[in-house]
Structure formats: structure tokens, C-alpha cells
Image (cartoon, rainbow, N blue to C red):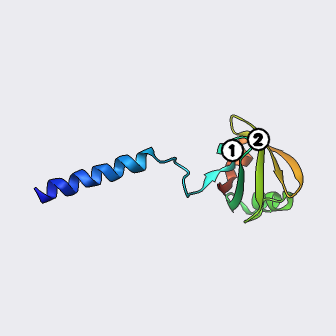
Amino acid sequence: MASEAAALQGLGAQAASAQAPAHAGGQLPLGMVGEDEVARVSKIRGGAELRQHLAELGFVEGAEVKVISRVNGDCIVSVKGARLALNRTMSSHVMVTL
């Protein structure tokens, strides 16, 4: 009986975590951030050349990024006072936290 109660509690915890947003407290690609949302850059994925290019554009760890417009992963963002357009491939390499 105790094992059944423990199993039911485990199922309840799984159901509760399934209802939470996938990005709650975690990282997500910049292309998944909604319009008018502000996020912080947490990590840049990809090769050294791509990471360097994005850093030169202002995408460095801790930088605040505001999504101005977003369509299918392509987005226009404001970072360090500049407006930039990123295609879905580039935006998928910028990991952010909300």
C-alpha cells in the first residue's frame, strides 16, 4: 500500500512538471522567445567563428535582448542599443533565459 501511494505521488509530480512551461527556469533558443519579451543571453552554441561573430554583434553572456518581431524562428531583436535581424539558424544558437 505504501508503495502504491509513493507511485501515485510520483505520477502527480510528473503531471505537475508536464504542465509547467518547457522553458521555466531553463534555457531556450532566442528564436522561441515571444515578441516584446526581454531575455538574457546565457550561452552561445556553435563553432568558434560563429560564437566570435555573434559576440561582435553584442550577443555575449549576460547581455539583455529584447525581441521586437518574430516569425517562425526568424527574429528582429534589440541588443546593446542596436536592432539586428537573425534568421532561425542564427537565433537557434543563442541560448537565453527569461
Q: Which residue corresponds to the image point at 77% horizontal and 54% vertical from the top-left?
A: 65
- Relative to the observer, which residue lies in front, 44 or 40? 40
- Residue, far top: 71
Q: Which residue corresponds to the image point at 75% horizontal and 60% vertical from the top-left?
A: 51
Element at badge 2? Answer: strand
- Residue, far right: 82
- Residue, far bottom: 61
Q: Indicate left or right for 15 with 48 as reference.
A: left
Q: Indicate left or right for 38 with 16 as reference.
A: right
Whether the residues at callouts 1 and 2 have beta carbons within 8 Å, the answer is yes
**How far across and down, in percent of the image, does residue 37 sit?**
71, 47
Crowd tier of the residue under label 2, counting other residues whose Cα lies within 10 Å: few below 14, some 14–19, many 20 or above: many
Badge 1 amino acid: Gly
**How far across and down, in percent of the image, does residue 72 sit?**
68, 34
- The N terminus lies in quadrant: bottom left
Badge 2 amino acid: Cys
Q: Which residue is mark 2?
A: 75
Q: Which residue corresponds to the image point at 64% horizontal and 55% vertical from the top-left?
A: 98
Crowd tier of the residue under label 1, counting other residues whose Cα lies within 10 Å: few below 14, some 14–19, many 20 or above: many
Instruction: Name the disc covering residue 98, or none.
Output: none
Element at badge 1? Answer: helix
Q: Which residue corresponds to the image point at 76% horizontal and 41% vertical from the top-left?
A: 75
Specify the quadrant of the image occupied by residue 67: top right
CA distance separating discs 1 and 2: 7 Å
Above or below, 80 against 74 in this view is below
**How far across and down, in percent of the image, does residue 6 sit?**
21, 57
- Relative to the observer, which residue lies in front, 92 or 26? 26
First-in-chain label (1 vs 2):
1
Q: Which residue is mark 1?
A: 31
**How far across and down, in percent of the image, does residue 46 sit?**
69, 57
Above or below, 84 against 45 in this view is above
